[in-house]
Image (cartoon, rainbow, N blue to C red):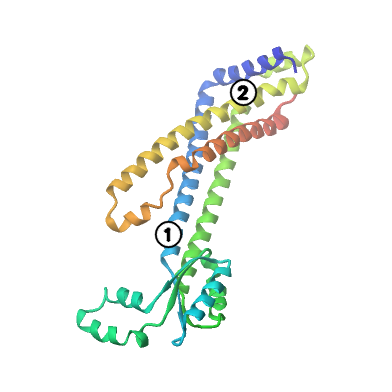
Amino acid sequence: MKGSSFTYLIKEGARNIWVNRMMSLASIGILVSCMLLIGSAILLSINLNGMISYVENQNEMVAFLEDDADDTMVSEVKAALDKNSNIDSFSFVSREEALERYSEIVPESLLENLEQDKDEVFPLSFRITLKDLSLINETTAQIESIPGVMQVNAPTNVAETVTGIKRAVYLCGSGIVIILLAVTLIIIANTIKVTVFNRRKEINIMKFVGATDLFIRMPFVVEGILLGVISACMAYLLLWGGYTYLMGHVQAQASTALSAFLKNMVPFSKVAKQLLASFAVGGVAVGVFGSMIFVRKHLRV
């Protein structure tokens, strides 16, 4: 394609938007709204997963060793835990450390007896966090099979609840994105339909003077691209400002109980490049796809 032809297509695409500016503004507004909803759904899903991961990390498994466990057995159990692919981290808890933790929740009058009998009351143990809570039952069985491990206490009910929430967040987020993409595609197609209808006489004249079908269709594709790019930039800037303001406001007003969860909120800078790229690619793709489908179906040249 010659440079003059390319310039003509760009100008025609931009002119289409200006001639049908009311419909184009409506299309951009709705497309921006759709992208904002999609971006919000993505950010919400990311933050929910971060908070769920925080809950996962707070629910530790505890593996108690046998009463006669010595340093050699502790080292062997540690080596076995190191080899388990689903274990994220673990820490050894001596009898003295267990007594110290327990002393924070019992009256001082009981501490003297506990200190004297700590070898019988508090077994050696490992506190363990997992990478994937959905595999908690399998991992529990693997740890219990390690020689020297007497018992494993695991939060199986919490694991099932957290796993269910993560699955629901994923399915709902995916469903919302698919629905919004379908709505956006319809909006772009309707905008192209109005443009084709308004320029039907000009299109017939171009056909009579020898213009090819591809050359006639391309301005509409360019129009879809421009609508997608403009909408993507506007949606990105609005989402950036809104998310930054909301995150700062929520963290400033949060109670102490929620502060630990809110620390796991994802800063916008961490996902900014990915969102901008997704908006740009998605906007252009939807614009081109909507234009091509509608022009192919309804443009009679």
Height in image: 187 above or below 145?
above
Height in image: 78 above or below 117?
above
Left or right for 97, reference 1: left
Which residue is located at x 57 percent, y 38 percent? Answer: 278
Tell me the residue that label 2 is attached to: 195
Residue most extreme to the front:
72
Quadrant of image for the C terminus:
top right
Residue 225 place in picture, x, y as percent: 61, 28
Q: Which mark is residue 18?
A: none
**Residue type indicated by callout 2:** Thr
Residue 157 place in picture, x, y as percent: 46, 73
Left or right for 268, reference 292: left
Q: Which mark is residue 54?
A: 1
Quadrant of image for the N terminus:
top right
Image quarter for residue 280? top right
**Residue type indicated by callout 1:** Tyr
Mark 2 burial class by Cα count in 10 Å: few <14, some 14-19, many 20+: some
Out of 22 and 252, give the one closest to the viewer: 252
Q: Mark 1: which secondary structure?
A: helix
Image quarter for residue 204? top right
Out of 73 and 199, give the one closest to the viewer: 73
Mark nearest the camera among 1 and 2 is: 1
Out of 264 and 287, give the one closest to the viewer: 264
Image quarter for residue 124? bottom left
Residue 282 place in picture, x, y as percent: 59, 37
Residue most extreme to the left:
109
